[in-house]
Amino acid sequence: MSNGPMNNGPAGDAQFVIFAHSGDYDRLYQVATLAVSAAANGDDVRVILFFEALRRFAADDLDDTRFPASYGEEGPRLEERMKKAHAHSVSDLIDTARQTGRLKLYACAAQVKFLDLSAADLEGIVDEVISLPNFLRQTSDARTKLFI
């Protein structure tokens, strides 16, 4: 765990923070598109993963494109339209954001315990396992904070 402040980048760029809770495909896709867009705009993006979002990242299960049942019959149609449009996959969007050097992924330390994950399960997936209070302190000046 880190105790120091998160750097806002060499030029003091703004932080864009996402609290990713849901593992539903539409929400993971939104996390990824926001992360890559904010990174491309020069923001330092910090995503902290909880519950089902953390489980999906740990299981390398980001690209299951099935929409949640709440979409009803529209879910499969939407999935098909996205395929026809050649929409980027969630994992490709995350990789692209990482390549900018502006995306950092964090796992909530409590959630790691709750989900019975280990450091080995998260190696190469998250940049750091961090306590929520510490993450909140380190991102307190973020320009944008979203809960998805």
Image (cartoon, grey):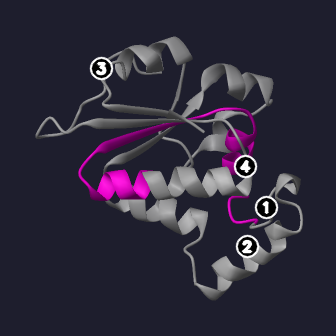
| Residue at 79 percent of width and 30 percent of height | 115
Residue 5 - label: 3
Q: Which residue is mark 4?
A: 56
Q: Mark 4 is on which residue type?
A: Arg
As helix, strand or loop, the secondary structure at mark 1 comes to loop
Tell me whether circle 4 and circle 3 mark residues in contact (CB < 8 Å): no
- Relative side of 62 to 107, left or right: right
As helix, strand or loop, the secondary structure at mark 3 comes to loop
Residue 30 - label: none
In reply to whether residue 117 is colored magenta, the answer given is no
Which residues lie in the magenta part?
35-64
- Residue 6: horizontal and vertical position, in percent? 31, 27
Of callouts 4 and 3, the N-terminal one: 3
Mark 1 neighbour class, 10 Å CA radius: few under 14, some 14 to 19, many 20 or more: some
**Above or below, 143 relative to 62:** above
Residue 67 - label: 1
- Residue 11: horizontal and vertical position, in percent? 10, 40
- Front position among marks 1 and 3: 1
Of callouts 2 and 3, the N-terminal one: 3
In reply to whether residue 50 is colored magenta, the answer given is yes
**Above or below, 74 relative to 1:** below
- Relative side of 103 to 33, left or right: left
Mark 3 neighbour class, 10 Å CA radius: few under 14, some 14 to 19, many 20 or more: few
Q: Mark 3 is on which residue type?
A: Pro
**Above or below, 103 relative to 111:** below
